[in-house]
Image (cartoon, helix red, strand yellow):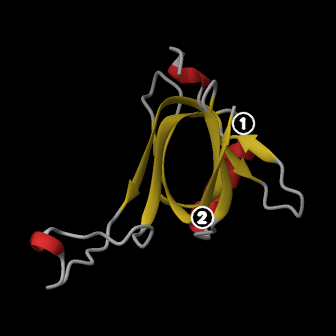
Amino acid sequence: MALQAGRDILLKISDNAQTPAFVTIGGLRARTIALSAKTIDGTSSDSIGNWRELLPGAGLKEATISGSGVFKDLASDEMVRIAFFNQEARNWQLIIPNFGRIDGSFIITQLEYAGNYDAEASFSLTLISAGALGFVAL
């Protein structure tokens, strides 16, 4: 992956329509994605040399996305706010230019608003995966 500006990473939320449209939620100034896979220990008294054996493909996978920035408009702010207060599992997209797009269902587990008196209001949020994720190389 070539060097690129962090500002080029986009986070989009679905409008939950039959044929969904994805809306960029705002000017994200910081964002991270963490992919994790827990393992299941299948070690038994029959394990050769008492070496731990892991069951392939049996563990729990999870993705966490965090970001902060400013909403680009009232519509994107409202979509995020509704999804949070209703604890809706919405489809989201994380687009990483020159790498790929991660698609899937996420629930907002944390939503914060902040601001200084002489600056714009900002937000931060955390999403946790709520189902299988897809990846499309770009």
Foreground disc of the pair 2, 1: 2
Mark 1: which amino acid?
A: Asp
Q: Nearer the viewer, residue 115 or 60?
A: 60
Residue identified by numbered label 2: 132
Residue at x-position 50% and y-position 14%:
3
Circles 2 and 1: CB distance less than 8 Å?
no
**The residue positioned farthest toward the front in the image shown:** 48
Residue at x-position 27% and y-position 78%:
42
Q: Tell me the quarter of the picture where residue 25 sits.
A: top right
Residue at x-position 69% and y-position 52%:
78
Q: Is residue 14 left or right of residue 54?
A: right
Q: Which mark identifies residue 31?
A: none
In the rendered image, residue 111, in percent from the top left (x then y), is placed at: 48, 53
Q: Residues within 10 Å of mark 2 (few under 14, many from 20)?
A: few
Give the quadrant of the C terminus: top right
Residue 111 visible? The answer is: no
Residue identified by numbered label 1: 73
Q: Looking at the image, is mark 2 or mark 1 earlier in the sequence? A: 1
Residue 9 visible? The answer is: yes
Q: Is residue 127 above or below residue 57?
A: above
Mark 2: which amino acid?
A: Ala
Q: Secondary structure at mark 1?
A: loop
Q: Nearer the viewer, residue 19 or 134?
A: 134
In the rendered image, residue 53, in percent from the top left (x then y), is placed at: 25, 70
Q: Nearer the viewer, residue 119 or 107?
A: 107
Q: Is residue 123 above or below residue 9?
A: below
